[in-house]
Image (spheres, rainbow, N blue to C red):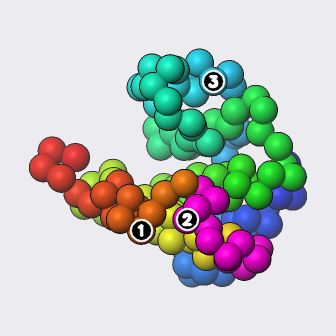
Amino acid sequence: MNSLIATYIAWIIAQTGLSVPDHPPIHFVTPTEMAMRYGTPENSGLELQALYNRTEGAIYLPQAWRPDDLRQKSALLHELVHHVQRSNNMDLPCIAAYERQAYELQIKWLREQGVEDPYALIGISGLGIYMLSVCRDGS
């Protein structure tokens, strides 16, 4: 896992020009724990691929996470983008704004892996990314 994280961080740094952070702690948790950390009921229908805890600087992955699954690997890369953002003290206008770069890099990485439609693979549209990354009053 350490070599995978190092590879992804190096790729993120090459794309962004930001500084290299220390590796974040990685925690493998149950679906219930993932839902609790996200603040969503487990039966909400939301399938959590990974989470980044900005306060802890830690990534949470489901226990069933597989290093050979391209979608799951891209979710790890997405969360590592958040770790790089945090470690570089990026100051954006709201928490949601951090998502745009993370999704853009996740999509770019998936295309480099040969995925023709990365949006379909991760289950989000360009509009969905916009909606998740736009600052709203009080966010």
Q: Amino acid at mark 2?
A: Tyr
| Residue 128 visible, this orientation | yes
Q: What residue lies at 71% left-to-right and 50% top-to-bottom?
A: 72
In the rendered image, residue 93 lying in the magenta stretch gets the answer no
Across and down, in percent, residue 79 comes to: 59, 52
Q: For label 2, count other residues whose C-alpha is less than 10 Å away and answer few (under 14), some (14-19) or many (20+).
A: some
Q: Is residue 6 above or below residue 43?
A: below
Q: Which mark is residue 57?
A: none
> Given this view, does label 2 or label 3 mark the residue nearer the observer?
2
Label 1 secondary element: helix
Q: Up-down: is 138 above or below 56?
A: below
Q: Position of residue 95 (x, y in %)?
A: 33, 51
Instruction: Specify the quadrant of the image occupied by residue 8.
Output: bottom right
Give the number of the disc on residue 31.
Answer: 3
Question: Reading the chain from its start, which is encountered first: label 2 or label 1?
Answer: 2
Identity of the residue drawn at 76% across and 77% down = 114
Q: Residues within 10 Å of mark 3 (few under 14, many from 20)?
A: some
Q: Which residue is mark 2?
A: 119
Circles 1 and 3 in contact, beta carbons < 8 Å: no
Q: Quadrant of residue 62?
A: top right
Q: Secondary structure at mark 3?
A: helix
Instruction: Write down the residue under mark 1.
Output: 126
SS state under label 2: helix
Query: For the residues marked 2 and 1, what is the alpha-carbon distance in whole angstroms?
Result: 8 Å
Determine the residue positioned at 68% across, 22% down. Answer: 30
